[in-house]
Image (cartoon, rainbow, N blue to C red):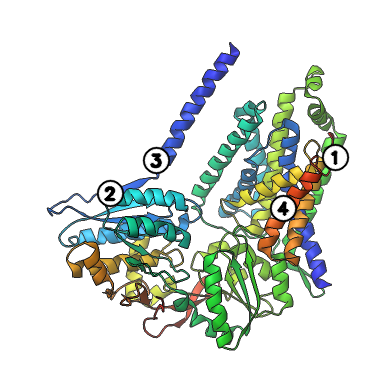
Amino acid sequence: MLNDRQQASRRGFFNQFALASAAIAVGTGGWVFRPKWANAALGPIKIGVAADLTGPLGFGGGAQANVARMIVKQINDSGGLLGRPVELYVEDTASNEAVGVANVRKLIQRDKVDMVIGGITSSLRNALKDVIVSKGKTIYIYPEFYEGKECTPYLYCSGPTPSQQTDNLIPWLIKNGGKRFALTGANYIWPHTLNAHVRKLIEKWGGEVVQEEYFPLDQVDFSSTVNRVVSNKVNVVFNTVIPPGTGPLFKQLYQAGFNKDGGRLACVFSDELQFALNQPEEIEGLATSLDYFQAVAQDDPISRKIQTEYDKQFPNKQMFAAGGGATGVYRGLKLWEAAVREAGTVERDPVAAALDHAKIAEGPGGPAEMVPGKRHCKMNMYIAVAKGGKFEILDRSVGLVDPREC
Amino acid sequence: MDSLINALFQMLSFGSIMVLVVLGLGVIASMMGIFNFAQGEFVLLGAYVTYFVHSLGIPAAIGMLVAPFVVGGFGFVLERTVVHRFYNAPVAAMLGTYALGVIIREIVRGLIGGLYLSVPEPIAGYVTVGKLHFSSWLCVTIIVNALVMICSYVLLAHTSFGLRVRASLENPALARASGISTAKIYSLTFALGAALSGLAGALIVPLFSLFADLGIRFLIQGFIAVLVGGVGSFAGPIAGAGAMGAFSSALPWLISPVIADVLVLAAAITFMKFRPQGLIWGRGI
């Protein structure tokens, strides 16, 4: 009797559990925004966003989706694109390639979107490009800074490349830090490829790499590395260890006296979110190089307008910051919009031909333009240094910087 | 010489952190015969409570004092409502506790917005001895761990509660026949194990920052530590944790960290092949 009752209640429990998990699985699936207007016989233009809304990269993916929402709203408020409304289809990749591919297939096959934008890791981009570009015959824009070397037709990169991020930064670091470099990185493709580029630059400008080390992606204890950094009398630690390791590494360097003895930290994905990772004194003087910082908005009215608009629409949500690809989404969508207006259609080939030389005058951090034939973006770059819990812009590029890819 | 002292200090500190994490896991594995896959999330909860208290503007040190009690209480409720149903089904227990762990982890991820958040040390900075810098907070961690170990030992070896715990561990049927409520002992022990992990989380959050996957790394290392140390006693997992912690923090001094990570696992597997009963075998303390 007792046993029966237990069985029954257990079955009930599992039923409820299955329901709950189904709700969790489906609930985050897709958000569809349908502006209530359809005056065009051709139907709406559809933009697909594949963003890491959940999982470890959620802080960046959420902001990417928000920027897309903001731009679609802007386009629709000002009369749409080619006289047609724009619909936004957001799918979650859950920071996972398998989930990403499955959900992006929905964008391509079910929703039949006219373009896809989004993604943070290179592994996700590589997994998605086949679904979107080869099989899906659709344009894909990848908005994140990355290691370069992506030259697939119909795949456009709107974030900075190694050349844009480091060609100016390394000589600046040698001048404002010293000649002895340690390269610390997470053990995957971006740190390895970027560091190969950085090593050449360091040697070209008369510095030397005294230490180059890679770590498992979840490593949080760096004591042996920190000890070697101190005993090798390293001047600059050029870091590509990604979270969760970033905060602990900088803290352990600080506690070993690296900063006090005049060492400089450098980390090219650090944006305003870095200040959540560390106490301000631990990363005082940290140098970074990206296409946008909130400090840029102080003296650039266009950047300020974008930043204010984002903060108004998404208060207390994921930050509008360059490190997670939010600025890349802005740039990528605006360039695509310009290309569609020029082409007068959303067909893939005419849009690609127009996107090849598309330009925008207004974007976060300044104007941007595609380099014809290269599918990468020219943009302004900034070198910023952490001071008392804020980034200060210490150097800005003269004109747009060439991505030097493909 | 300086490097050697630094390395020894790091081995000691990382070893003692591992001991604290693993103690709860080991106690539950030895006593109830189940592996609690949600143990890493107790570490995470301890860290989260500390962060939460800190974010209210209250000093993080208060959060660290509160964390073990909150997590212990949570563990108690969890045991009474869910975990005790799994004692007779170790495989289902792994799946069930794994599911609990995922639920806790994803809730915390939602609460912190998927971010990586730093919590300041109550005692910041470093102690300088000659040319060497030692993190003050690591020193505190080592001392607290030592105190917790002593208290746990006294509790288990010299109190009547400890006697009943040991009795339930060695021969549950006889313990029940002697009028000991093993169900109650199990709940309390589970809560104690959760509280210890919560304390570990609270102590390490200033070092490693708060993020949703904080517990996972410790969970995997903790399991290997329990297996290396030996299931069944209290000393086994502790010895295993100390060995694992010291070994995994010593290896990167000698070889590349990526290889070290793999080598620790390889060494643990080899060790278990030749000594499947673990470092310390047998029941008791």
Residue at 70% from the left image edge and 34% from the top image edge:
B190
Q: CA distance from mark 1 to mark 4?
A: 35 Å
- A196 above or below B206? below
Residue at 71% from the left image edge and 43% from the top image edge:
B196
Q: In the rendered image, which quarter contains the C terminus of chain B?
A: top right
Residue type, numbered disc 2: Asp
User: Looking at the image, which residue sits at the far right?
Assistant: B158
Is A109 displayed left or right of B192 in the figure?
left
Q: CA distance from mark 4 to mark 3?
A: 40 Å
User: Looking at the image, which residue sits at the far top?
Assistant: A1
Element on which disc 3 rests: helix
How packed is label 3: few (under 14 Cα within 10 Å), some, or many (20 or more)? few
Badge number at residue B266: 4
Q: CA distance from mark 2 to mark 3?
A: 17 Å
Specify the subunit that label 1 lies on.
B
> In the image, residue A77 lies at what x, y percent?
21, 59
Residue B77 in sight from this viewpoint: no
Q: CA distance from mark 3 to mark 1?
A: 51 Å
Specify the subunit that label 4 lies on.
B
Label 2 close to label 3 by CB (< 8 Å) = no
> In the image, residue B58 lies at what x, y percent?
61, 53
Name the residue that disc number 1 marks.
Answer: B154
Name the residue that disc number 3 marks.
Answer: A26
Q: Nearer the viewer, residue A62 or A303?
A: A62
Badge number at residue A365: none
Residue type, numbered disc 3: Val
Q: Nearer the viewer, mark 2 or mark 3?
A: 2
Q: Nearer the viewer, mark 1 or mark 2?
A: 2
Quadrant of the image occupied by residue B160: top right
